[in-house]
Image (spheres, rainbow, N blue to C red):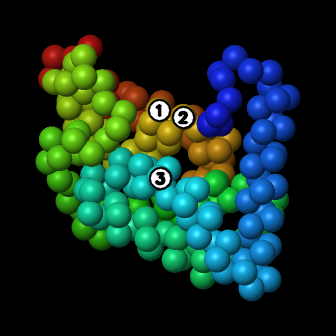
Amino acid sequence: MTKGIAANTDPDRIRNHENQIMDEDHDMIRNVLHGDTNRYRKLVEKYQGPVFNLLIKMVNNFEDAEELTQDVFVKAYESLAGFNFNYRFFSWIYKIAINRALAELRHKKRYTEIEHIQNKLTEENTDAPESNAQVKMAIDNLKDLYKAVIILKYYEGLSYKEIAIMLDIPEKKVRSRLYDARIKMKEALEKTGIR
């Protein structure tokens, strides 16, 4: 998922843009590791929106997502010395966020009302609010391992490879979980009359 480049752009140009972003992020990380801790603020500003959006979709609670976003960036800062420069910072921070969200879901095992989440999410389809709510409810009722792949693929627009890296599972397993999750969602939605 590349921001700032049209979907019909040349793949080499997209790759170059992504490499430029990766290089900029890596430079900021090196500066932080060499004592310029103010540079970390730039990384937080750059990625806190996407991390928060991911977390709110995962935990379905605005306040929890805000708190988890802070936790993710604190954990990332504390672990920055172990950052692998072969990867994008974006992928690394997303992996931390997913793991933190899954831990929170396991710990709390509770969900907030769907209307609260609908007000907070920015990607609403106002044409069909009733079916939208039922789809979100079907996602909420999935096991966490299925919920994570659905959100990363369809809400965040990540590739199978990116999801595999973030969840630390083989790409084939990502495809399998997505297939299983879609089947479970289809069954749940058919019970509510949506086909």
Q: CA distance from mark 3 to mark 1?
A: 17 Å
**What count of labels does the image hold?**
3
Above or below, comparing residue 108 to residue 36 in the picture: above
- Mark 3 or 1: in front is 3
Which quarter of the figure has residue 70? Answer: bottom left
Q: Label 1: which residue?
A: 154
Mark 2 and mark 1 residues within 8 Å of each other at the beta carbon: yes
Q: Is residue 65 left or right of residue 52?
A: left
Label 2: which secondary element: loop
Above or below, comparing residue 19 to residue 107 in the picture: above
- Amino acid carrying label 1: it is Tyr
Q: CA distance from mark 2 to mark 1?
A: 5 Å
Q: Position of residue 154 (x, y in %)?
A: 47, 32
Q: Label 2: which residue?
A: 157
Decide which of 100, 127 is in the foreground and name it.
127
User: Any mark on residue 49, and which?
Assistant: 3
Q: Is residue 194 left or right of residue 66?
A: left
Residue 92 in view? yes
Residue drawn at point x = 36 percent, y = 47 percent: 57
Rate crowding at label 1 as few (under 14), some (14 to 19) or many (20 or more) other CA atoms within 10 Å.
Answer: few
Label 1: which secondary element: helix
Counting residues from the N terminus, which is met first, the one under dot 3 or under dot 1?
3
Counting residues from the N terminus, which is met first, the one under dot 3 or under dot 2?
3
Above or below, comparing residue 55 to residue 81 in the picture: above
Q: Position of residue 98 (x, y in %)?
A: 48, 58
Which quarter of the figure has residue 128? Answer: top left
Residue drawn at point x = 35 percent, y = 63 percent: 66
- Amino acid carrying label 3: it is Gly
Rendered-image quadrant of the N terminus:
top right
Q: Position of residue 129 (x, y in %)?
A: 19, 24
